[in-house]
Image (cartoon, rainbow, N blue to C red):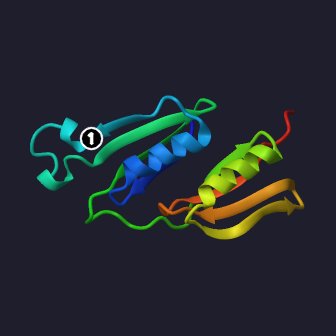
Amino acid sequence: MSFCPYIAFDGNCREAMTFYAGVFGATDLQFMNFSDAPPGTMTEDFKDKVMHSQFSLGGVPLMGSDAPANWFQPQAGVSVFHGAKDKTEAARVFGLLSDGATIVMPLGPVFWSEAFGMLKDRFGTSWMITLAPPAA
């Protein structure tokens, strides 16, 4: 067993997950729409929304879906953490995620890492980007 992030979106899951897959170079992005569910499962106006999506990075999935309007709440109190292989990769990922984002902490050196930064991207997802810990 393991933990993995599952992000709820306000109707823009397909756009967000496609963007994230591009940022991280994922080639296994998958989508399932609510229209794939049995009839009567969701209202007609929601049928083209995403019921489930996912891709993997290093064997760990990132998953998401569109939340029904009566259930959706903006993300708070949690971040998706990404450990980049080096400073160049950390800067690249942080830079791409920064487009339209609110920067919480610019990417830079901190006492525990040569690069760490936090942001809330244009889709409302909070991210922490840092260097991957050195191999034991």
Count the marks: 1
The structure residue drawn at horizontal position 67% and vertical position 56%, both measured from the top left corner, is 95
The structure residue drawn at horizontal position 82% and vertical position 47%, both measured from the top left corner, is 87
Where is mark 1, residue-wise?
Answer: 33
Establish if 49 lies above or below 38. below
Establish if 48 lies above or below 125. above
Mark 1 closeness class: few <14, some 14–19, many ≥20 residues within 10 Å: some
Q: Looking at the rendering, which quadrant does residue 25 occupy?
A: top right
Residue 51 percent location from the top left of the image: 30, 44
- Horizontal placement of 22 versus 86: left or right? left
Establish if 131 lies above or below 8. above
The structure residue drawn at horizontal position 68% and vertical position 63%, both measured from the top left corner, is 118
Residue 19 percent location from the top left of the image: 50, 47
Residue furthest to the right in view is 111
Pick the residue in front: 132 or 77: 132
Pick the residue in front: 4 or 12: 12
Residue 59 percent location from the top left of the image: 59, 29
Look at the numbered disc 1 and give the secondary structure of its residue. Answer: strand
User: Can the viewer see residue 3?
Assistant: no
Identify which amino acid the numbered label 1 is placed on. Answer: Asn
User: Can the viewer see residue 126?
Assistant: yes
Residue 93 percent location from the top left of the image: 67, 49
The quarter in which the N terminus is drawn is top right
Residue furthest to the left in view is 40
The quarter in which the C terminus is drawn is top right
Pick the residue in front: 19 or 114: 19
- Horizontal placement of 92 versus 125: left or right? right
Establish if 61 lies above or below 7. above
- Horizontal placement of 93 versus 111: left or right? left
Q: Looking at the rendering, which quadrant does residue 132 occupy?
A: top right
- Horizontal placement of 16 versus 48: left or right? right
